[in-house]
Amino acid sequence: MATKKKLLQAAAGSAGGAGGLDITSVFSTYLYSGNSSAQTITNGIDLDGEGGLWWLKRRSGTGSHALYDSTRSTGSEHFPIFSNNTSAEYDDFDTTPTSTGFTINSTSSGTVNEKGQDYASWTFRKAPKFFDIQTWSGNDTNPRVINHNLSCQAGLVLIKDITGSGTDWFTAHHSEPTKNSFITTGAFFTASYINTLTSSSFTLGDNVVNSAGREYVAYIFAHNDGDGDFGPDGDQDIIKCGSFVQGTGSYDVDLGFEPQWVLIKSATSVTNWMLFDNMRGLVVDGNDAILKANTTAAEENSDPYLSLSANGFTSHLDQITGNQTYIYIAIRRGPLAPPEDATEVFDIYQNESTATVPGFKHPFPVDFAFYKASTNTEDWWSGSRLTQGRTLRMNTSNIESSASSHLFDYMNGWSSSTTTQTDYISWAWRRAPGYFDALCYKGTGANRTVSHNLNASPDLIWLKSRETVSSSNDWWVYCSAFSNPTDTNIILNSSGGQNTGSGAILWNSTAPTDSTFSLGTYNGVNQSGKEYIAYLFSTLAGVSKVGSYAGSNSDQTIDCGFTSGARFVLIKNISRNSDWIVLDHVRGIVSGSDPFLRFNDTAGQNAFADYIDPDSSGFIVTGANSPTNQNGDNYIFYAIA
């Protein structure tokens, strides 16, 4: 993130308002490996200056959920309370908040930092309209009003007596105003221990949460309802605390945004508090990674519980406990602001001679990637966070297949496979407004729109069926640079030129918008009941460019608006049969012959053609050659700075 952006967000936070804050400034899911010694978790959240909650849980084995917060400390040391038991604050496993996350102090505890074990952390920064913490000393006087600083509806309150063992966690959710629950037993019941959740306070109604001689802490989660103050314009919601009733069959929950973190619980039966996030795995039409806030159980990955959509999620919880009322907290996926630097959202990695995990290293959590052996004959393999554990080949029409190593639960890359084969190259994208988005959808067979979160009209769309359809399973491509884009298509896994006259059945003869794209009735993109995936790319000033140009007999500069040239270039001659040409700075974009690959072909790279030369504004297409610059031919391209 640019320094200017950080300073603006910090100023907004210190001024006491959430306006302008991005989700990335107030919430983080961060995965880490234990090392049995001190380690620092850098997640970009200012816990030292602003305060908040950091919640740690072992994934790879049993262990308590350890919750730390900025209000409870002994000097610089902060100690946990456990959501899965009734113990008092535990005087061990100490951590320290920092301006960019927290430090786990030297410990070999399996709970938070054992070497060889995998862990998840969730950090909630105190901020108006998102999250607050309050503490009090019990006084036996009820009802008692506890004020908070959310400045909006309190959605969920969790209260714990931190001074004595044997006292449960008490919870209240605004959608169940006459009920409270315990966390450890999972039961909801009619009570008024915590009640009257408002935009400024909640009320204690019993000594179990207000006993004299006891100290209490409350974690208070906001509920935004069109009144959120987040994002570049300070007008977006990022947290919802709602409920829904689900009978048999799946149920669509409309949040108005795609979540990255969901805590969900049946309010009508004794069930677990189920915790999901998209870093560990919320897989569309696949098994989700689940942890249970009320148990010590290790992470499970055996059932499809939730499927993400651009506007919320689909619940498949009827398979466990049908005919239930569920309450939830959902936090929006970020970021909300477009990237200012392409290195934040795109990276290329060439494999090293030392085999390590993740197999492909990148400087950010990856949302979509493809890889290929650059010098050998091999397919282009792709994977995404939304469909992890599965793969599609970019150069074929084959449907999705299992790929157990295609995992995205890493902060620094993707894939659990390891190899010392140094010609393997991975090209990786991160989702961000105005730049790139990914989504899955189910076909309807009828003209329809599909919602997306690109927050810009996509200039390039790749669509692919994930399962067999009754027509072509090809990768279908929309490009705004076509002369008539809503009546034209081209196929990514083919050398063929553009096709016209199919716009009605493919794109419903309708241009995409900044929130939807349109589909016709063609089974290749919209067969009823079939699963599809879509990747959306757009032009973003100084970061990426989708465009077109006419071929020439001589060199011509393609100005993409960059300042340091293009790191990645994809070019297609749309006038005739011609390969999709892939070039990048890792293998070499130089003045002279460039190593190039063909997206639609399994062949290894060819280094005997001078197709492009570097230029600070973008790139130069050279000479007179059919793949990139033939006089009289038309070309489309996608470039990243």
Image: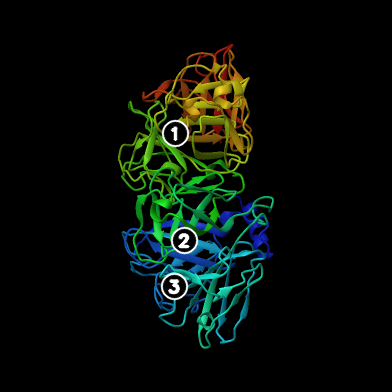
Task: Answer above or below: position of 335 versus 534.
Answer: below
In the rendered image, residue 311, in percent from the top left (x then y), is placed at 56, 46
Distance from Cα at disc 3 to Cα at disc 2: 23 Å
In the rendered image, residue 621, in percent from the top left (x then y), is placed at 55, 21
Distance from Cα at disc 1 to Cα at disc 3: 46 Å
Tell me the SS state at disc 3.
Answer: loop
Q: Identify the mark nearer the N-term, 1 or 3.
A: 3
Identify the disc placed on residue 265.
2
Q: Quadrant of residue 230?
A: bottom right
Horizontal side, residue 14 vs residue 412: left or right: right
Task: Answer above or below: position of 24 versus 540.
Answer: below
The one nearer the camera, 70 or 319, is 319
Residue that carries the numbered disc 1 in the rendered image: 530
Residue that carries the numbered disc 3 in the rendered image: 80
The one nearer the camera, 210 or 136, is 210
Q: Identify the mark nearer the N-term, 1 or 2.
A: 2
| Mark 2 neighbour class, 10 Å CA radius: few under 14, some 14 to 19, many 20 or more | many
Callouts 3 and 2 close, C-beta under 8 Å: no
Horizontal side, residue 153 vs residue 589: left or right: right
Residue lying at 62% horizontally and 37% vertically, measured from the top left: 540
Residue 323 visible in image = yes
Q: Identify the mark nearer the N-term, 3 or 2.
A: 3
Q: What amino acid type should be assigned to the residue bearing mark 2?
A: Lys
Residue 557 visible in image = no
Q: What amino acid type should be assigned to the residue bearing mark 1?
A: Lys
